Image (spheres, helix red, strand yellow):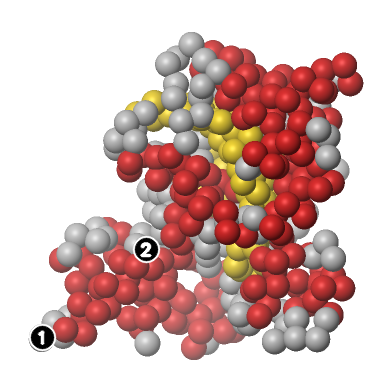
Amino acid sequence: MQSIQLGQLLVNFGLVTEAKLVQALELQRKRMPRRLLGELLVEEGIVSESALRGILTVQKRKLEAGREPGKGEDALKARLKGQSLVEYLRVVREMEASDLHLSAGQRPTLRINGLLKEMPVDPLSPEQCRSLLVAALAPSDWKSFDERRSVDTSITDPVAGRFRLHMFHHSAGIAAVLRAIADKAWEFERLGLPDQVAQTARYDQGLVLVTGTAGSGKSTTLAAMLHLINKSRKVHVITIEDPVEVVHDSDRALFSQREVGTHTGDFASALRAALREDPDVLVVGEMRDFETTSIALMAAETGHLVFATMHTSSADRTIHRILDQFPAHQREHARTVLANVLRCVVCQQLVPTVDGRGRVLAAEVLHVTPAVANLIREDRMHQIPASMQLGKKEGMCLMDDSLGTLVRGKRIPIGEALSRAAEPERFMRPGAGA
């Protein structure tokens, strides 16, 4: 039981892949005398001793909290009393939360599996909230915060890892949201996306979009795709992020990662400069305005492979969102360019599982075949969903079909599928949830 739990924690923290864990468990069964899983992982060079010690500490705390739920909350309250922000961040990692909310007048709150959960501590006064953040931020960040009334940055702790931080003013004082960033990119196989999506890492040019609402795993998917490139291609990859999230150590590829606000003023100017920096692959953290979008399309049109994210919920809406950024007199030309350069759109949602202990990826995938390109060129985007239904062999999938597969596999409740589906009536047909 403890070995399995340790393995699950290692996978959740991104320290081993599921495939590596299965191999290690099989090796453990064959070894005589029998070895502890942690010792075996260190011996085989799969995890470091320091990483194992950290995970064992997390495991111990989880086991203690499970045996004594009430005392677990009391212990957490005592642990955090008078502590710095770093201790809160370590709790975030241990509880496998995605976000930490700090807000004057409110209790610190975690987001776990998509749901908010207050921590068992007293509400923060404006002074306490400010003091938690003062020590963690650089003076330049505070200066920017005073000038702009909000700031985006990242902070790092040797134990808790890296976090993206957004701090802002509100009616009761200041507040901050800190999002946990993976220490390293996931292996693509862990995402649960069709294998055909991995082929985008081999393209020489074109535009690949990963879309979804905030917290839908866009950054994780994008990092996994870049990891594929890093392992397999000798290319120069330039990323423009706000802030830099997963740090990629150059392997076969050469990585240059730039942070908006630290290394450049904005996405558009950084993207324009990147075209003079001999890139093969460009990564735009978000295509959020006309200028950034038009430069990204130009980069894809002039022979670069461009990856970007957007906040859209379906493939056809993504295409409309891009085109809507252009003035009416430029829209026809933009459709032609987009039809020529768009390669793939992946739209994501993270859906709570049946047991309520995690979330699973549901994804809509559009590969731009010649037929789909013609639909874009001729302004017939309303026909794209029908083309996607016919393109399953190419790895295409509508969001409703992805949700249906998860329901049939008993991975998500049918109620979750109904609340997220474009056509909920499909899930009410006989056998839809079987």
Camera sees residue 95: yes
Expressed as whole percent of the image width and height from the top left, the position of residue 254 reads: 34, 29
- Residue 28 higher or lower than 240, as above or below: below
- Residue 240 higher or lower than 61, as above or below: above
- Residue 385 higher or lower than 57, as above or below: above
Residue drawn where x is 76% and y is 27% of the image: 335
Q: CA distance from mark 1 to mark 2?
A: 24 Å
Between 39 and 358, the residue placed more toward the observer is 358
Expressed as whole percent of the image width and height from the top left, the position of residue 210 reads: 62, 44
Camera sees residue 137: no
Q: Residues within 10 Å of mark 2 (few under 14, many from 20)?
A: many
Residue drawn where x is 61% and y is 80% of the image: 409
Expressed as whole percent of the image width and height from the top left, the position of residue 418 reads: 81, 72
| Residue 17, label in figure | 2
Between 370 and 265, the residue placed more toward the observer is 370
In contact (CB < 8 Å): disc 1 and disc 2: no
Task: Specify the amino acid type for callout 2.
Answer: Thr
Task: Specify the amino acid type for callout 1.
Answer: Met
Residue drawn where x is 40% and y is 40% of the image: 229
Expressed as whole percent of the image width and height from the top left, the position of residue 25 reads: 27, 78
Q: Is residue 27 left or right of residue 427?
A: left
Q: Which residue is mark 1?
A: 32
Element under disc 1? loop
Residue 241 falls in which quadrant of the image? top right
Q: Is residue 352 left or right of residue 238?
A: right
